[in-house]
């Protein structure tokens, strides 16, 4: 692969007076099947992250919040890209060296990978990368950083209630010098595979978003920046959660009405979804939701 294969991808931007929404899903905006998602946050100014290459992993990087530069290197040429809009992503094919630099305050970098984490797929030494790029293979022995993959059980029945939904503590890989990283890997972290990711941003104070339910879709809701409140409703009981940590997510099972409000300044809400967008899976009216719930009994 060469620098010419790296490209900016324009993502959908759905404008709304209550705040904007962008999304990316398998084999559409993302030109591969998503196997791994991780996000970098709390990165100190002047610190670079991610100086490595991966042999078999394609990736897309998005600035969910703030801005940063990505320097991509094919062993012969370098090119720098600035990401500072939530509706643009950078596609980096496998086999290229890349480093993320110049993080602004409160920047969050979201990254999608085409393969599960494999320590043997990484090249972390630039000289080894130059050798790899010249011969197309390498013989590196690299120490595993030991990702601890939390799991939650999928006990979804026909009728879920608000107490079947819970806060999930996600991996938080902390570095005093380089900030934090949180990972979600399909088949390991969640009881569903992530096929779509969407996120809400530019939300004015006092607005609420996301008042709807899904018939079959499972979700993990994460506050990657700022804070907001999620209120869940199963038709009988309401339960509220405040999300304000990038390493915690709210697991919401199908058939639960949910509403988001009380957004702080600069809040970004990211939702990991178990399926691509399907309009007929949505329940957008609370009256329709009550009928749906009654039919489940």
Image (cartoon, helix red, strand yellow):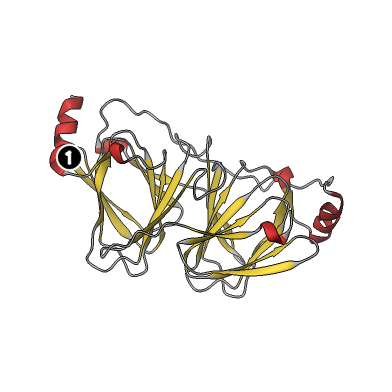
Numbered label tally:
1
Q: Would you name the residue on which mark 1 appears? A: 237
Judged left or right of residue 219, residue 189 is: right
Q: Residue furthest front?
A: 4
Characterize the local packing of mark 1: few (<14), some (14-19) or many (20 or more) Cα atoms within 10 angstroms: few
Position of 87 relative to 25 (above/below): below
Q: Residue at x 37, y 64 (%)?
A: 226
The one nearer the camera, 235 or 72, is 72
Say if residue 56 shows up in the picture.
Answer: yes
Q: Is residue 195 left or right of residue 238?
A: right
98 to the left or right of 224:
right
Quick one: 80 or 213, which is closer to the camera? 80
Residue 236 visible within the image: no
Assign a secondary structure to mark 1. loop
Q: Position of residue 176 (x, y in %)?
A: 59, 65
Q: Quadrant of residue 228?
A: bottom left
Quadrant position of the C terminus in the picture:
top left
Q: Where residue 276 sits: x, y (%)?
A: 41, 41
Q: Answer with the quarter of the image where residue 164 lies.
A: top left
Q: Position of residue 272 (x, y in %)?
A: 42, 46
Residue at the image position 52 percent from the left and 38 percent from the top = 186
Residue 187 rendering spot, x and y as whole percentages: 53, 34
Is residue 206 positioned above or below 5 on the image?
below
């Amino acid at each position: 692969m060469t620098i010419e294969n790296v490209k900016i991808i324009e993502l959908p931007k759905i404008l709304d007076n209550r705040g904007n929404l962008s999304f990316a899903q398998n084999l559409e905006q993302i030109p591969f099947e998503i196997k791994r998602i991780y996000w970098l946050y709390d990165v100190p100014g002047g610190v670079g992250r991610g100086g490595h290459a991966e042999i078999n992993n394609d990736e897309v990087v998005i600035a969910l919040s703030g801005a940063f530069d990505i320097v991509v290197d094919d062993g012969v040429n370098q090119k720098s890209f600035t990401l500072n809009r939530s509706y643009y992503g950078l596609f980096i094919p496998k086999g290229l060296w890349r480093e993320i630099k110049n993080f602004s305050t409160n920047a969050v970098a979201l990254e999608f990978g085409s393969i599960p984490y494999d320590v043997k797929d990484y090249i972390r030494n630039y000289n080894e990368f130059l050798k790899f790029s010249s011969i197309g293979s390498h013989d590196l022995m690299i120490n595993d950083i030991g990702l601890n993959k939390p799991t939650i059980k999928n006990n979804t029945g026909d009728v879920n209630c608000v107490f079947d939904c819970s806060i999930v503590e996600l991996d938080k890989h902390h570095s005093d010098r380089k900030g934090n990283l949180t990972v979600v890997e399909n088949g390991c972290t969640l009881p569903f595979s992530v096929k779509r990711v969407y996120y809400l941003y530019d939300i004015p104070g006092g607005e609420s978003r996301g008042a709807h339910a899904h018939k079959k879709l499972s979700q993990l809701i994460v506050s990657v920046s700022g804070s907001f409140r999620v209120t869940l409703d199963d038709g009988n009981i309401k339960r509220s959660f405040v999300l304000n940590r990038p390493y915690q997510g709210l697991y919401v099972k199908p058939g639960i009405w949910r509403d988001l409000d009380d957004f702080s300044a600069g809040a970004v809400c990211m939702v990991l979804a178990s399926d691509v967008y399907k309009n007929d899976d949505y329940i957008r009216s609370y009256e329709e939701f009550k009928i749906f719930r009654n039919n489940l009994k």
